[in-house]
Image (cartoon, rainbow, N blue to C red):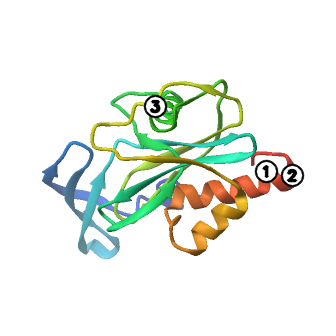
């Protein structure tokens, strides 16, 4: 039987020590020494992140996306609106906030689609994906350092952007597959 603690309920790794390496505004980095099977030790580099929310928002049948330069990737990307959670913040509240800040639209209603870990091999970031097709005009208010270009795109445009590498982040790719399923079945997951 597999549980959250491993196979047959055995915890696969015990943390022996933690060294805190870096504490930033968004993430922290630690190196854990762990005991693995047979009493051996190993190190795990772990990025701690507060989590994030993203919104798959349809406006008149088109997906609202934002384009921005992503320094970590050294390229311009087109993504669904998203942002990190504030301490103790409800993910749905964060999704509503990010949608309006980044696109200038407010969700009249929001539905949870899925929550998933972005890179569980080294990070604990969990991303909460929401859906809305009930929008009203709000006020765009991006962060000081964000230079965003808002666009409403068709599924065909989105697929072209993906083929061209303009859409390549996991949350947006997942949203596109959910959107396509929605178009085919009328259901969100």
Which one is earlier in the sequence, the residue at label 3 or at label 2? 3
Residue 164 placement: quadrant: bottom right
Q: Nearer the viewer, mark 3 or mark 2?
A: 3
Q: Nearer the viewer, residue 20 or 136?
A: 136
Q: CA distance from mark 3 to mark 2?
A: 32 Å
The 10 Å Cα crowd at callout 2, few under 14, some 14 to 19, many 20 or more, is few
Q: Is residue 32 above or below residue 58?
A: below
Q: Residue at x 24, y 72 (%)?
A: 42
Q: CA distance from mark 2 to mark 1?
A: 5 Å
Give the residue number, with chain letter if any, for mark 1: 182
Q: Nearer the viewer, mark 1 or mark 3?
A: 3
Residue 35 percent coordinates (x, y)? 27, 66
Give the residue number, with chain letter if any, for mark 2: 185
- What quarter of the picture does the N terminus occupy? bottom right
Residue 118 shows up from this direction: yes
Residue 9 shows up from this direction: no
Tag 2–tag 1 contact (CB < 8 Å): yes
């Amino acid at each position: 039987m597999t549980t959250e603690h491993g196979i047959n309920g055995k915890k696969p790794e015990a943390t022996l020590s933690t060294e805190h390496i870096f504490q930033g505004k968004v993430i922290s980095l630690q190196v854990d020494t762990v005991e693995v099977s047979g009493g051996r030790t190993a190190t795990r580099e772990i990025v701690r992140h507060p989590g994030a929310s993203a919104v798959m928002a349809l406006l008149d049948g088109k997906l609202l996306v934002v384009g921005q330069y992503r320094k970590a990737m050294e390229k311009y990307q087109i993504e669904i609106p998203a942002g990190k959670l504030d301490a103790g913040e409800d993910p749905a509240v964060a999704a509503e906030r990010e949608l309006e800040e980044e696109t200038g639209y407010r969700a009249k209603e929001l539905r949870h689609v899925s929550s998933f870990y972005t890179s569980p091999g080294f990070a604990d970031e969990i991303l909460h994906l929401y859906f809305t097709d009930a929008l009203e005009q709000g006020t765009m208010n991006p962060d000081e350092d964000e230079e965003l270009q808002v666009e409403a795109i068709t599924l065909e445009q989105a697929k072209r952007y993906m083929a061209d590498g303009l859409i390549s982040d996991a949350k947006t790719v997942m949203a596109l597959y959910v959107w396509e399923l929605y178009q085919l079945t009328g259901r969100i997951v």
